[in-house]
Image: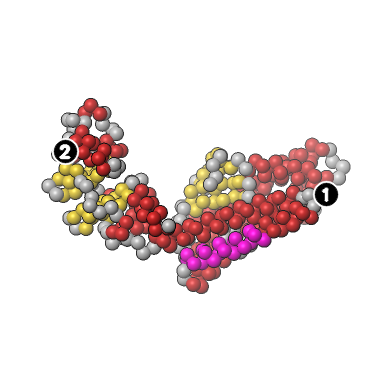
Amino acid sequence: MLGNSWQIGRVFGIPLRIHISWFLVFALVVWSGRSYFPYVLPSSPSWVYWAMGIVAALLLFASVLVHELGHCLVAMRYRIPIAQITLFIFGGMAQIRREAPTPKAEFLIAIAGPIVSVVVGLGFWLLAALPGSPPELTAVSEHLRNINLMLATFNLVPGYPLDGGRVLRAALWAWSKNFHKATRQAARTGQGFAVLLMLFGAWDLVAGPAIGGVWFLLIGAFLYTAAHNTHRQVAFQESLMGLRVGDVMTPDVVVLEAGMPLDEAVDNYFLRFGYGGFPVVQNGRLVGMLSLKELKTIPRHRWGTITVGEVMAPHNLQAEIHPDEPITAAMERMFHDDRSRLVVRDEDKVLGLVTRSGIARFLDLRQR
Ligand SMILES: [Zn+2]
């Protein structure tokens, strides 16, 4: 979803990325500081307001970052790997690789972000209240106090995928013991809240030429899309549930003999059947897999002198799967080992092949 982003470093080993839309936020905060600070701190030279705006924008950056780190550090305590943190126009997004193992874990991961924001907000509150500090520092601290408390409040709204929506999902999940149902319900409330936001934005626009209206419309639209996608994703995961490898595999698998020369394999099998790979057998036993990937490493003029057995990927247990295994296990293994096909085998018999494209086609047909 977020193209156009750059990694600017790592925090706690997690890649930190900035999306191009973040610069718009930066500009907005600096610009709004330019109109806000003269109001609380009149009669300073103009460059002071600009400088305060820039400092406020940098501190906002840090505030959003520590909010996301709050989520990440709790997730890491549950041994859930974090792919990356991305800062973009609507704040931050920590990409967590796996769903939380329990409702309690889900709750703690979700609530950690807003708690961090409240603590940071209180910190700026203290800083603002410090007697004898320069008025510029007080003004910036008050600004950041408000921003952080707003960040916590907005994120606690109980609509998935906001933090509050995750808290709601954790509660529903604990209550119904059904993760998918809980996700669907939390996403529904997320969509409902998004509609409210957009209505409010529209009303604000009609009431007066305020930039707030556009902002609410945008956030609402973003939230609606995210909640809607979640809904679709759940439907997809549910459609996979209960499916076994045997249900989606390609039966009548065509196999290659290990002693066959490559040119014969190409002419009579790869070109004729159009598959990307074939299991290789020797004396009726599965010994490996030959796919276009291996074939491409051999120059064409040597195809007549080299046999399938010499270039195939030797068979290992990771490349095969039992027909009774759930289809999700096959997909996970293909994804994890970067394979595009697995041999379906029961005892010594090769029953078929399960491929990425085959699964995609199967699901596509089922959804119609
Ligand atoms: Zn959060």
Q: Nearer the viewer, residue 111 or 326?
A: 326
Secondary structure type for disc 1: helix
Q: Nearer the viewer, residue 138 or 283?
A: 283
Q: Residue at x 43, y 62 (%)?
A: 238
Residue 287 horizontal side relative to residue 118, left or right: left
Q: Which residue is mark 2?
A: 260
Does 253 lie within the magenta span? no
Task: Specify the label residue 329 is tagged with.
Answer: none
The three-letter amino acid code for the residue at tag 1 is Val
Q: Nearer the viewer, residue 89 or 123?
A: 89
Residue 351 at x, y percent in the picture = 22, 55
Q: Earlier in the sequence, mark 2 or mark 1?
A: 1
Residue 85 horizontal side relative to residue 90, left or right: left
> Which residue of the protein is positioned furthest toward the right in this rendering?
43
Residue 188 horizontal side relative to residue 136, left or right: left
Please tell me how crowded label 2 is: few (under 14), some (14-19), or many (20+) other residues with Cα within 10 Å: some
Q: CA distance from mark 2 to mark 1?
A: 84 Å
Task: Specify the label residue 40 is tagged with.
Answer: 1
Secondary structure type for disc 2: loop
